[in-house]
């Protein structure tokens, strides 16, 4: 699966944040290491999933790709060139819908196109096309408060797809949805990915979701986030009516990712406990 030129490359990427401002001008601020020495290649058209314990730097990693923040060390490359800022070659879908409440579903999808200077008529056509693609025919005139959580997330997906980015960045996009809505959105997203061949970087807490969606699942360590292991998932070809979750292959991948992840979650909890003990001793 790895191709000669990766679509995305993390090269020894580190990211630290200043912890607090120093009391004196001479003291350097303490820094918190969110990501350490991340090396990661993502092939063109790959569906790449990233899992890791809470606080391990998953959102930070996606922000680096989105150009919303910059690495402290190393480089993030997109098509071989360093990411310098946000761009329309990448579309992001967050956990919370980030829709404009005063605009209809259509208006929200068109919003992403207005910034790109798409003519009005074409915007309307594209909005209709992408709302239909995500199963929202007939809901174009509804406002976000008139839509369910799943429908709002469909609008957010349509908005990102409408301006045709090469790369979709998704930060726990289905985490707030009920199980059934989540399953149908997972299917829709796989369908969109198969039809469009976009590169997807998808972050999740859910092991099942990771194995179901990912061609490769990257497990990050707890603080600081490093690449613990990459698991290549091959569930084989199957009829659309089959539920892949019930296959023995699925169970084996789920077990593998769970093992990798659980070691890290325990380590994160142990770190937390020892930090608390340190505080008690100091007090
Ligand atoms: P995750 O998405 O895996 O839960 P994040 O990437 O959101 O983790 O955060 C990783 C760590 O970096 C957390 O401990 C968080 O508190 C810290 N962090 C994230 N953004 C900032 C920031 N702008 N300033 C300081 N610390 C931050
Ligand atoms: Mg996060």
Image (cartoon, rainbow, N blue to C red):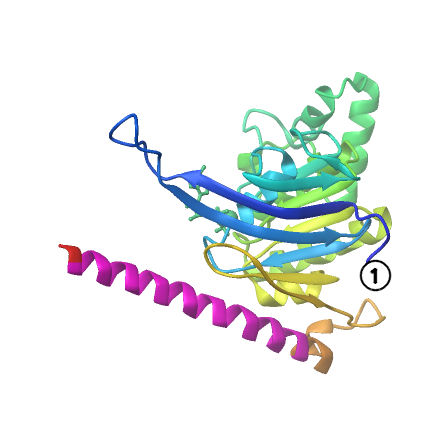
Density class for disc 1 (Cα within 10 Å; few <14, some 14-19, many ≥20) is few
Residue 224: x and y, percent?
47, 54
- Which secondary structure, mark 1? loop
Q: Residue at x 75, y 21 (%)?
A: 116
Q: Is the CB atom of the residue marked by disc 1 within 8 angstroms of ligand 1's nearest atom?
A: no
Left or right of 232? Residue 207 is left
Residue 77: x and y, percent?
72, 40
Identify the residue position indicated by label 1 in the image. Answer: 1
Q: Residue at x 23, y 63 (%)?
A: 277
Res 127 quadrant in image: top right
Name, please, the residue furthest toward the left.
Answer: 283
* Quadrant that contains the N terminus: bottom right
Residue 89: x and y, percent?
75, 33
Whether residue 24 is visible here, answered yes or no, is yes
Q: Is residue 265 magenta?
A: yes
Res 106 quadrant in image: top right
Residue 247: x and y, percent?
72, 79
* Quadrant that contains the C terminus: bottom left
Count all numbered tags in the image, as a single digit. Answer: 1
Q: Is residue 161 magenta?
A: no
**Residue numbers of the magenta segment:** 252-281
Res 241 quadrant in image: bottom right
Q: Vertically, is 266 above or below 248?
A: above
Left or right of 116? Residue 230 is left
């Amino acid at each position: 699966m790895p191709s000669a030129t990766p679509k995305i490359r993390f090269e020894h990427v580190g990211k630290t944040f200043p912890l607090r401002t120093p009391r004196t001008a001479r003291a350097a601020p303490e820094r918190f290491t969110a990501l350490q020495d991340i090396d990661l290649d993502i092939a063109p058209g790959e569906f790449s999933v990233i899992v890791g314990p809470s606080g391990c730097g998953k959102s930070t990693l996606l922000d680096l790709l989105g150009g919303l923040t910059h690495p402290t060390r190393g480089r993030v490359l997109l098509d071989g060139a360093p990411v310098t800022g946000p761009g329309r070659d990448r579309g992001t879908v967050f956990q919370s819908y980030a829709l404009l409440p005063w605009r209809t579903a259509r208006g929200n999808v068109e919003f992403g196109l207005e910034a790109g200077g798409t003519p009005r008529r074409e915007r309307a056509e594209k909005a209709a096309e992408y709302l239909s693609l995500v199963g929202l025919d007939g809901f174009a005139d509804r406002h976000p408060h008139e839509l369910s959580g799943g429908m709002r997330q469909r609008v957010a997906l349509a908005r990102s797809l409408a301006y045709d980015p090469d790369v979709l960045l998704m930060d726990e996009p289905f985490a707030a949805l009920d199980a059934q809505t989540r399953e149908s959105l997972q299917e829709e997203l796989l369908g969109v990915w198969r039809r469009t061949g976009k590169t997807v970087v998808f972050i999740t807490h859910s092991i099942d979701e990771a194995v179901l969606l990912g061609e490769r699942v990257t497990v990050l360590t707890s603080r600081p986030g490093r690449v613990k292991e990459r698991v290549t998932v091959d569930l084989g070809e199957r009829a659309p009516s089959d539920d892949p979750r019930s296959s023995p292959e699925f169970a084996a991948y789920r077990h593998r990712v769970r093992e990798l992840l659980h070691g890290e979650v325990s380590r994160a909890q142990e770190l937390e406990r020892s930090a608390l003990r340190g505080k008690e001793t100091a007090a």
